[in-house]
Image (cartoon, rainbow, N blue to C red):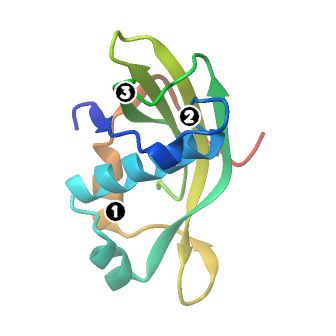
Amino acid sequence: MENFILPIQIRWSDIDQNRHLRHSAYYDYGALARVECFTKQGLTTSKLEEFQIGPVLFREEAIFKREIHFEDKITIDLQMSKSRPDFSRWSIVHHLYKEDKTLAAIINLDAAWIDLNLRKLTVPNSFIQKIFEGFPRSKDFEWGDPLKR
């Protein structure tokens, strides 16, 4: 898959008392980008329901580089930065850029798959694995277990 880039429309409700983007909006944008990317690749919410599987987050971290204001035009991208070979555990890095290509924030995420019936971590099926094989990867991508530090 080629790089996934999503333009973001900043809403008035995303702005805090300091007149810049509230901290939790960054995480909302990351979630939006992931869902859009998964859907674009065919991993829709109906497929997740069919497979009785869902992503579960273990860590989500934002690193703020530059302020984002209401009038700013921004985009978010995402790339896989680490994964087990079976894609049961994985990490994604997101970059939020201003219109002039200034890096405004980085979001790092560690996640896995949960079996929605057993409520236990699981290995995704071949449909999901094939999608993740084609996922955009960061320059420093590595195979390994993101949950082991």
Q: Distance between the residues labelled 2 and 3?
A: 11 Å
The residue depicted at 36 percent of the width and 75 percent of the height is 48
Can you identify the residue that label 3 sits on? 74
Q: In the figure, is residue 67 to the left or right of 97?
A: right
- List x then y, in percent, for residue 95: 46, 27
Q: In the figure, is residue 149 to the left or right of 36?
A: right
- Asked whether 50 or 25 is in front, the reply is 25
The mark that comes first in sequence, 3 or 1, is 3
Q: In the figure, is residue 43 to the left or right of 53?
A: left
Please state which amino acid type lies under the numbered disc 2.
Answer: Leu
The mark that comes first in sequence, 1 or 2, is 2
Can you identify the residue that label 2 sits on? 21
Vertical order, 19 against 29 (above or below): above
Vertical order, 35 against 126 (above or below): above
The residue depicted at 64 percent of the width and 34 percent of the height is 62
- List x then y, in percent, for residue 42: 21, 61
- List x then y, in percent, for residue 94: 48, 33
Q: What element carries label 3?
A: strand
Q: What is the count of numbered marks?
A: 3
Q: In this orientation, does residue 38 appear? A: yes
Q: Is mark 1 on a helix, strand or loop?
A: helix
The residue depicted at 53 percent of the width and 59 percent of the height is 88
Can you identify the residue that label 1 sits on? 128
- Asked whether 140 or 67 is in front, the reply is 67
Mark 3 Cα-neighbour bin, 10 Å: few <14, some 14–19, many ≥20: many
